[in-house]
Each structure stands twice: as structure tokens, then as C-alpha cells.
Image (spheres, rainbow, N blue to C red):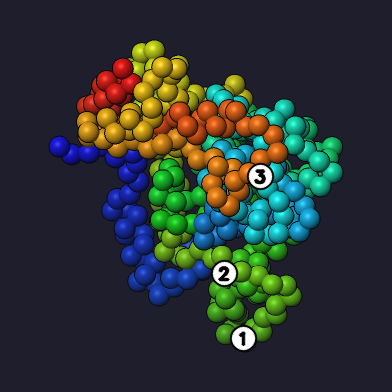
């Protein structure tokens, strides 16, 4: 019996040829394809600046530096997120402060953020959980008067929308992931977007060791002139390669089709799951999701999630536990300042269903039958 996986990236010959062409060009490090991918991604979002990096984690790291976050500062984050969200705050010496989320969307709300704001709050990282767009306007309304920058962790949200615009487009700073679990993948990789030219220029320097002139610009200097760079602050090696960017350019062109297919499959799940569909993640009132993760909240009276997952595996369906809660993991255990009931409900009672571009109706029928049998 073959197993139906949770996720398969939609990659094909076009991506393979683009990567091969980058290799054949002789330029495989950060170079012209990275610049082209940045411009294409910025155009897609309708933002002026996009800076390609090695992962969304490094994107968040740079976002924290760009927001001026440092030792002694606090940053409000959801515990219900991959641990990288909290870790990026810790990297710059600041303290992540966990806020609860809305049980339906898995996202921070204005009320949960307001509950943990203090005089030391320097920023808020608002996550688009599983591709569900966060209500950025509402969170800005409570964070702004405190002088806190709202950074959008749009890791999962390429292809989602917020009030008619691409998710992350309205954020002062946003960070995206191109990990294989995301719709748009470059293997590993990420992007920081912003609206400030000076900030974008600084982020470009920081991703390349703080170098005043990029390696690509030095190698393509007019007339072969020697260009000597300087290093005015400590930077990092957070670069993306041209091979990854070549794949990303192809993937970006496929993104609308990916989103349409995943939304259609999610709607079909909803129509087939019967009463269980009440626990299926859905669009919020202020936007549309890309269903990067199609999670299902198990109803009251359902078997333990571990048992449900075991039953699904025995039926040839590979589901996953729901989204993790950072405050329950060793590095952050005991650090929550307020109760996080919705976070703990979702992390303990949700599971992620298979959803990928090439999922067939027959496979989806198998998943639904297995879920209904496993939950009882």
C-alpha cells in the first residue's frame, strides 16, 4: 500500500532546466538571477523592495535588526508558530513575549497583542499561520501607539491576500519562506520586503557580511575596474544562490495555479468531511488563504490525536501533528506571561491533512474516508 504524503512540491522540467542554465552560466552564487527574482517578487507583491536571503529565519533575523530590536527590548510573537519566529528575536538579544491566537485562524489578534504590550515592546511579529492572512491593520492599531514596528512573518503566505492585496504587501517589513513545505519553493531560501529604500540597502549589505559593494557588483564593474569594498558594520552570510533564484523565478510564474488548485482541493475537503468540516481551517473575513497547511481541529470526544495519526498511517495516509507551540518547548518553557488557551488547544488537537498540487480526487477520497474512520 502506497502512502499519501502531506506535501509534494510542484517541481518539474522547467525548474530543472532553469537550475541547469544557471550552472552552465558559470555564475552560481548570488548574482543576476537573484536580482531578477527580487524584482519579480517585488512586482508580484506591488512593493518597492525585496531582498533575497538564505531562509525565512534569516529574513526574520534581518527584519529584527532593521526594526532596531536589540538587548533589553521585547517582541510580541505567537507561541503558535514554528520556533524560528521566537528564535529570531532571541538572536538579537531581545525577549520574545508570547501572545495567544484566535482559535479559528491560528493568528494573533489586536486583543491578544494588547494583553502583553509593555513599555519595552519594540516590535510585534504577526504570523500568517498556515497561509491564513493575519489582520495586520487591527494589530497595527494597538501596536502603533506604543511605537512598536509590526513585522509580518509571511513565511507561509505567498499567494494569500489581505484586503485585496497580496499578504505582506502592506507590512513595513515582511519575511517569506521558500522551504519545500511552502507553495513557492527554491529548496531553501527566503525574502525580506520593505517600503524604505535606505532599509533595503542596509539589508542587502547585512546579508553579505556588511559589504559596502556586493560581490556581483565588484565582478561586473565597468571596464573591469577594481572596486574595493568596505565593512562598516558586522553582517552575516545570509545570501541566496543564483541556482535557487532561477528555480524561484519559475515557481513564481506557477504560483497563481498553485493557489487555485489548493483552494479547490480545500473546498472539496470541506464538502466531503461532513460534520468534521466545522474544524477545518477557513478564510478569515479580511482575506483569502493559500491553504499552505490544511489543518483540522479534532472535535470534542474524538480519540487522542496520537491515536488518530496512527490510524491514518495504518490506512496509508501521512498526516502530521498540528502547528507547534514554542512556549512548550525546552528553550522557552515556563516563559509565557499569560495563559495561552487557544494556542494549546490548536497545538494539541489539530492535525494537518495531505494537500498538494498533484493530489488526485481518488487520493483525497481515501484521505477523507480514513479521517472519518479514525475520528469515529
Q: Residue at point 33% right, 28% down?
A: 308
Residue contact between numbered discs 3 and 1, judged by CB atoms under 8 Å: no
Q: Nearer the viewer, residue 329 or 210?
A: 329
What x and y, as percent, mark residue 155? 53, 45
324 or 129, which lies in front? 324
On the rendered structure, is 204 left or right of 121?
Answer: left
Q: Which residue is mark 2?
A: 237
Task: Report, in whole angstroms, how far the alpha carbon at label 2 lies from the one at label 1.
Answer: 25 Å
Does residue 292 appear to the left or right of 108 in the view shown? left
- Dot 3 alpha-carbon crowd within 10 angstroms: few under 14, some 14 to 19, many 20 or more: some
Name the image quarter holding residue 112: top right
37 w.r.t. 295: above or below: below
Residue placed furthest toward the bottom? 226
Mark closest to the chain's N terminus, 2 or 1:
1
Where residue 252 appears, x then y in whole percent?
A: 45, 47
Eye-nearest disc, 2 or 1: 2
Q: Residue at x 81, y 41 (%)?
A: 118
Quarter of the view holding residue 272:
top left
Q: Residue furthest front?
A: 334
- Percent across and percent down for residue 106 are 56, 31
Looking at the rendered image, the disc whose residue lies closer to the viewer, 3 or 1, is 3
User: The N terminus appears in which quarter of the rendering?
Assistant: top left
Secondary structure of the residue carrying numbered label 2: loop
Instruction: Tell how many labels.
Output: 3
The residue indicated by pointer 1 is 225
Residue nearest the viewer, comparing 17 with 361: 361
Decide: few, some or many residues near mark 2? Use Cα within 10 Å; few <14, some 14-19, many ≥20.
Answer: some
Judge from the rendering whether residue 128 lies leftward or rightward of residue 303; answer left or right.
right
* 77 up-or-down from 199: above or below: above
SS for callout 3: loop
Q: Which residue is mark 3?
A: 335
Amino acid at each position: 500500500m502506497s502512502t499519501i504524503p502531506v506535501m509534494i512540491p510542484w517541481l518539474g522540467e522547467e525548474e530543472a532546466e532553469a537550475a541547469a542554465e544557471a550552472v552552465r552560466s558559470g555564475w552560481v552564487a548570488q548574482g543576476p538571477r537573484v536580482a531578477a527574482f527580487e524584482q519579480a517578487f517585488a512586482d508580484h507583491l506591488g512593493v518597492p523592495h525585496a531582498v533575497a536571503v538564505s531562509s525565512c529565519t534569516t529574513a526574520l533575523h534581518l527584519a529584527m535588526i532593521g526594526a532596531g530590536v536589540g538587548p533589553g527590548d521585547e517582541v510580541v510573537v505567537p507561541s503558535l508558530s514554528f520556533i524560528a519566529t521566537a528564535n529570531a528575536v532571541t538572536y538579537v538579544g531581545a525577549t520574545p513575549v508570547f501572545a495567544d491566537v484566535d482559535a479559528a485562524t491560528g493568528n494573533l489578534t489586536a486583543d491578544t497583542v494588547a494583553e502583553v504590550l509593555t513599555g519595552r515592546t519594540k516590535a510585534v511579529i504577526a504570523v500568517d499561520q498556515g497561509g491564513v492572512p493575519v489582520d495586520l491593520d487591527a494589530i497595527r492599531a494597538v501596536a502603533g501607539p506604543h511605537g512598536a514596528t509590526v513585522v509580518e512573518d509571511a513565511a507561509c503566505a505567498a499567494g494569500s491576500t489581505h484586503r485585496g492585496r497580496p499578504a505582506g504587501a502592506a507590512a513595513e517589513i515582511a519575511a517569506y519562506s521558500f522551504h519545500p513545505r511552502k507553495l513557492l519553493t527554491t529548496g531553501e531560501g527566503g525574502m525580506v520586503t520593505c517600503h524604505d529604500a535606505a532599509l533595503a540597502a542596509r539589508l542587502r549589505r547585512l546579508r553579505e557580511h556588511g559589504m559596502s559593494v556586493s560581490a556581483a557588483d565588484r565582478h561586473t564593474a565597468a571596464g573591469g575596474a577594481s572596486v574595493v569594498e568596505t565593512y562598516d558594520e558586522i553582517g552575516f552570510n545570509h545570501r541566496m544562490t543564483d541556482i535557487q533564484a532561477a528555480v524561484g523565478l519559475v515557481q513564481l510564474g506557477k504560483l497563481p495555479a498553485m493557489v487555485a488548485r489548493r483552494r479547490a482541493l480545500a473546498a472539496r475537503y470541506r464538502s466531503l468531511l461532513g460534520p468534521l468540516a466545522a474544524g477545518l481551517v477557513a478564510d478569515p473575513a479580511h482575506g483569502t488563504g493559500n491553504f499552505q497547511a490544511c489543518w483540522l481541529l479534532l472535535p470534542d470526544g474524538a480519540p487522542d490525536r496520537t491515536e488518530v495519526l496512527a490510524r491514518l498511517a495504518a490506512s496509508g495516509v501521512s498526516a502530521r501533528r498540528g502547528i507547534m507551540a514554542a512556549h512548550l518547548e525546552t528553550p522557552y518553557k515556563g516563559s509565557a506571561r499569560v495563559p495561552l488557551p487557544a494556542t494549546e488547544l490548536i497545538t494539541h488537537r489539530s492535525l494537518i491533512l495531505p494537500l498538494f498540487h498533484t493530489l488526485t480526487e481518488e487520493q483525497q477520497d481515501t484521505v477523507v474516508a480514513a479521517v472519518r474512520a479514525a475520528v469515529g
